[in-house]
């Protein structure tokens, strides 16, 4: 189904670049951010900003103050939005926590993409699913 032409130019996709980094040396972080910025440019996306959780906040799943700020900013976006990360592990190394964090992006109207081309909006490429642990299934 075609969308009607409103005469308005299409809004570019906004790339919300996220990372987390626990150490004082930043060479690895700088390289990951550079890959994200390059990926956004190659896809014609506009960088909406950079959010990096550092120190202890980078080592835990909660709290993630910069992640929360990214989600807030994404909710305000007036254009298609992606949370761009270098790899899924930049969101979280734990699958369950990563899924919950990705769900927040989807609830804010966005999707998550990696610089390897993985996209959680495409089936089979990091698509998120949330299920209750077996012990909790069937309970209210």
Image (cartoon, helix red, strand yellow):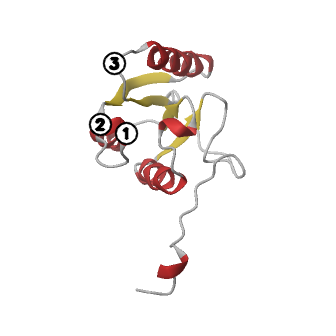
Residue marked by disc 2 = 56
Sooner in the amino-acid sequence: mark 1 or mark 3: 3
Sooner in the amino-acid sequence: mark 3 or mark 2: 3
Name the spot of residue 78 as percent of width and height, x first.
39, 37
Q: Are marks 3 and 2 in contact (CB under 8 Å)?
A: no
Q: CA distance from mark 3 to mark 2?
A: 12 Å
Give me the disc on residue 72.
Answer: none
Q: CA distance from mark 1 to mark 3?
A: 13 Å
Q: Is residue 73 visible?
A: no
> Looking at the picture, does residue 61 appear above or below residue 45?
below
Name the spot of residue 8 as percent of width and height, x first.
49, 30
Residue marked by disc 1 = 59
Query: Residue drawn at (53%, 39%), measured in percent from left and top?
Result: 89
Q: Quadrant of residue 56?
A: top left
> Looking at the picture, does residue 3 appear above or below residue 42?
below
Q: CA distance from mark 1 to mark 2?
A: 5 Å
Residue marked by disc 3 = 24
Q: Are marks 1 and 2 in contact (CB under 8 Å)?
A: yes
Helix, strand or loop under label 1: helix
**Closer to the camera in the image, 62 or 50:** 62
Name the spot of residue 123 as percent of width and height, x first.
70, 52
Query: Residue drawn at (30%, 31%), measured in percent from left and top?
Result: 55
Q: Residues within 10 Å of mark 1 (few under 14, many from 20)?
A: some
Name the spot of residue 106 as percent of width and height, x first.
47, 51
> Looking at the picture, does residue 114 appear above or below residue 63?
above
> Looking at the picture, does residue 23 appear above or below residue 122?
above
């Amino acid at each position: 189904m075609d969308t009607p032409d409103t005469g308005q130019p299409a809004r570019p996709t906004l790339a919300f670049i996220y990372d987390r980094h626990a150490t004082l040396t930043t060479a690895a972080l700088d390289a990951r951010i550079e890959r994200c910025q390059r990926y956004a440019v190659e896809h014609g996306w506009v960088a909406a900003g950079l959010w990096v959780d550092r120190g202890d906040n980078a080592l835990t799943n909660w709290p993630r103050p910069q992640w929360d700020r990214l989600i807030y900013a994404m909710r305000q976006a007036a254009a298609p939005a992606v949370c761009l990360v270098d790899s899924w592990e930049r969101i979280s190394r734990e699958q369950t926590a990563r899924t919950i964090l990705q769900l927040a992006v989807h609830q804010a109207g966005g999707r998550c993409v990696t610089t390897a081309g993985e996209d959680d909006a495409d089936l089979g490429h990091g698509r998120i699913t949330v299920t209750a642990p077996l012990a909790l299934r069937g309970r209210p």
